[in-house]
Image (tube, helix red, strand yellow):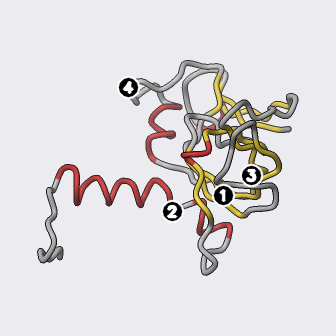
Amino acid sequence: MKEVIITKYGAPSVLQVREKRNPNPREGEVLVRNHFTGINFSEIMARMRLYPGAPKPPTTLGAEACGIVESVGKNVTRHKPGDKVMLFCKYNSYSTHICTDETLVMPLPEKFSLEEGAAFPLVYVTAYMMMFDLGNFQKGETIL
C-alpha cells in the first residue's frame, strides 16, 4: 500500500509518499480500499504543529475517507467485502488502505458518489455535535 506521511512539521513540501505492507484487520476492524480522502483544516494545522493532540512525525494524517471494504476482522457483523462505505479513522486516511473499527464505518448512501462520501463524515459529526451536544437543539425548534 501507499501512504502520505509527514516526516517533520512544516509546509506541504514535508508530505512524502511511502510504501508499506497492507494492514490486516484485527478483531472488530474493517479493511477499506480507500478511493477518496477528505482533507480538513485540522490536518493542515497538525502538519504545521498547531493542532493539540495530533501525532508527532513521522506519521500519516487524515480522519475521513470513502472506499470499498476489502476484508473484515473476526466478529465484524456490520460490513462485508465489496460494501461501499465512508469512514472515520484516527490519523491514517492519507493511505490506499485503512483499517478502522467497524463502528466508525458507515454504508455509503446510494445517492452519494465515493467522492462525496469522503467529505461527509466530519462535516456531519461537526453539525450534529453543534446542534445536539453543544446547542441543545430540541424537537420543534428551528435553525437558521
Judged left or right of residue 12, residue 81 is: right
Q: Is residue 12 above or below residue 144?
A: above
- Which residue in the structure is indicated by mark 3? 34
- Which residue in the structure is indicated by mark 1? 66
Q: Earlier in the sequence, mark 1 or mark 3?
A: 3
Judged left or right of residue 20, residue 31 is: left
Labelled pair 2, 1 in contact (Cβ < 8 Å): yes
Viewport quadrant of the C terminus: bottom left
For residue 120, the mark is 2
x, y percent for residue 129: 29, 52
Name the residue: 76% across, 44% down.
72
x, y percent for residue 121: 50, 57
Labelled pair 1, 4 in contact (Cβ < 8 Å): no
Q: CA distance from mark 1 to mark 4?
A: 26 Å
Count of labels in the image: 4
- Which residue in the structure is indicated by mark 4? 52
Labelled pair 3, 2 in contact (Cβ < 8 Å): no
